[in-house]
Amino acid sequence: MVSTATILSILAYTLNFLAVFVFFFIIILGVLCRRDMRDISLVLTYNTCFAALLTCLTVLIMNTSNLSDGFLTFNFDFCRVWGLMYDMCQCSIYHSFYLQAFYRLCRVIFYKKKSLLSYSLFLTLVFAQWTLTILILLPPFFLGWYTRLPTEQYCLIPYSDYGAELYHVMVLYVIPIVCISATYISITRYIRRSSRQPTMMLAINQQRRNLRDLTVMRRILALISVLIALRGPTIIFMVYAVIRGQMYEYTFGIVGLVTALCMIFMGLMLIHITPQLRKNRLVSIIYHDNRANTQQTGPQCLTLPSATGGATGLPQQTKSPHIRKTPTHE
């Protein structure tokens, strides 16, 4: 009779394998489209995909250890390093989304400061993000918080260590989510405030970019909900452990399953909200994207504003020429 823990591990392994395929496919598209790598938004997207791919690979190895002889636990130091690597990759996913939010903030609000939109700046910030992730997660490693889990064949910070897990949740989950949410709220307020200004107060091209950014941000809200769901089960099971005084038996199996589902959805959403990926021929075939949707933005960008509402960036209706009728005599 196959145990429930084994079934959960098999399901998590299968879903993580699919997630690895999704993110590997996105990165391959990036390699094939090297000419677009000077696009800052695309670089930031690939940064997120790289962190997500590493996360899925580390989880895949953990699931393999669970389903086999527990090879990750043969060397305790290596087991702890592998657990640290998993947390670093997952933490980088959250911080990479904050980098994307900061880029949108500079594009919409500080668009006149060209230094804040330079390619070299954001490339430096990507490296700084990974460095910061390593630095904030090294203290738990040296303090010995990573240990072998009693019900699993790998090492992580146990949820029963409330002090360690509280620090872990704060730096990995709460702080990035609060920063991301605050940034997008600021951008949304700025766009709404700008839309109430007179037409000549804002450049037409900038307002069009704002409207496009607003559309992207609505889709990113779905991704933020995925980020919340990605760490939500951890908090739920931590509260359960505090109330009951012990961990639920299938805690890490359920968390692994939810993580795998969230990673797959995140990969598909990244394809959907990234025009350079969505318009790729291979993606169009797989994703069933029709040509009408990919070409829809072209005519709109060329529409000339009218005297009444052109700054909105939306196409205006043209009036048909007035035809003068010849009077007839009755």
Image: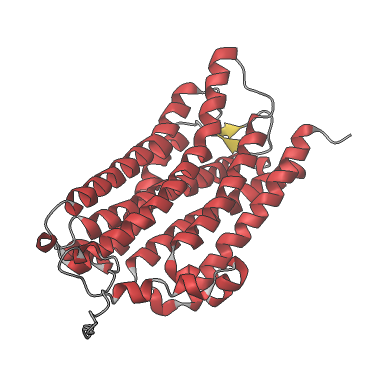
Judge whether residue 55 can be spotted in this image. Answer: no
Q: 153 or 215: which is nearer to us?
A: 215
Q: Residue at x 52, y 20 (%)?
A: 239
**Residue 113 horizontal/vertical position (percent):** 14, 62
276 vs 53, left or right, is left
Q: Which residue is drawn at 52% across and 40% down?
A: 230
Q: 211 or 100: which is nearer to us?
A: 211
How many labels were placed on the picture? 0
**Residue 264 horizontal/vertical position (percent):** 59, 52
Residue 328 to residue 17: above or below: below
- Could you say which quadrant of the image residue 117 lies in? bottom left
Residue situated furthest front in the rendering: 330
Residue 142 to residue 52: above or below: above
Quadrant that contains the C terminus: bottom left
**Residue 318 horizontal/vertical position (percent):** 27, 74
- Could you say which quadrant of the image residue 169 lies in? top left
Residue situated furthest right in the rendering: 1
Judge whether residue 242 can be spotted in this image. Answer: yes
Q: Residue at x 35, y 64 (%)?
A: 41
Quadrant that contains the N terminus: top right
